Image: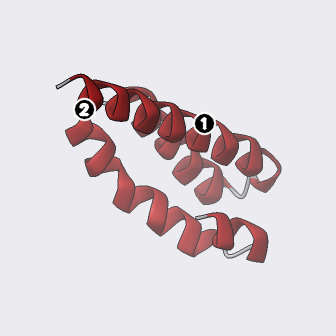
């Protein structure tokens, strides 16, 4: 998604965000799923000026979730 954002490839960014939603849902990361939906909607509406902010929020949620999972696995 980061490459799509930098290249301005909005349609592929939308497709990638859409593809990640089930994975976020499966992992129980509803806040990430919500951000991915916002990215999809922003692309559909041509609201490109907010997409970088939404991407950064999604990335932060993903990174924090990964760190939390690693901590949990380390405690097993």
For discs 1 and 2, the disc positioned in front in the rendered view: 2
The image quarter in which residue 1 lies: bottom right
Name the residue: 26% across, 49% down: 22
Name the residue: 64% across, 36% down: 57
76 relative position to 8: left or right: left
22 relative position to 31: left or right: left
Secondary structure of the residue carrying numbered label 2: helix
52 relative position to 29: left or right: right
67 vs 75: above or below? below
- Calculate the distance from the C-alpha at mark 1 to the C-alpha at mark 2: 20 Å
Whichever of labels 1 and 2 marks the residue nearer the N terminus, that label is: 1
Secondary structure of the residue carrying numbered label 1: helix
Mark 1 — residue?
A: 60
Residue 60 in percent (x, y) is at: 60, 36
16 relative position to 19: left or right: right
Name the residue: 28% across, 30% down: 74
2 vs 62: above or below? below
34 vs 39: above or below? above
Mark 2 — residue?
A: 73
């Amino acid at each position: 998604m980061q490459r799509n954002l930098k290249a301005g490839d909005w349609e592929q960014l939308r497709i990638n965000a859409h593809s990640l939603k089930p994975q976020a849902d499966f992992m129980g990361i509803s806040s990430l799923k919500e951000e991915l939906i916002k990215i999809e909607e922003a692309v559909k509406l041509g609201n490109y000026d907010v997409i970088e902010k939404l991407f950064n929020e999604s990335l932060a949620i993903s990174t924090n979730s990964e760190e939390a999972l690693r901590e949990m696995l380390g405690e097993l």
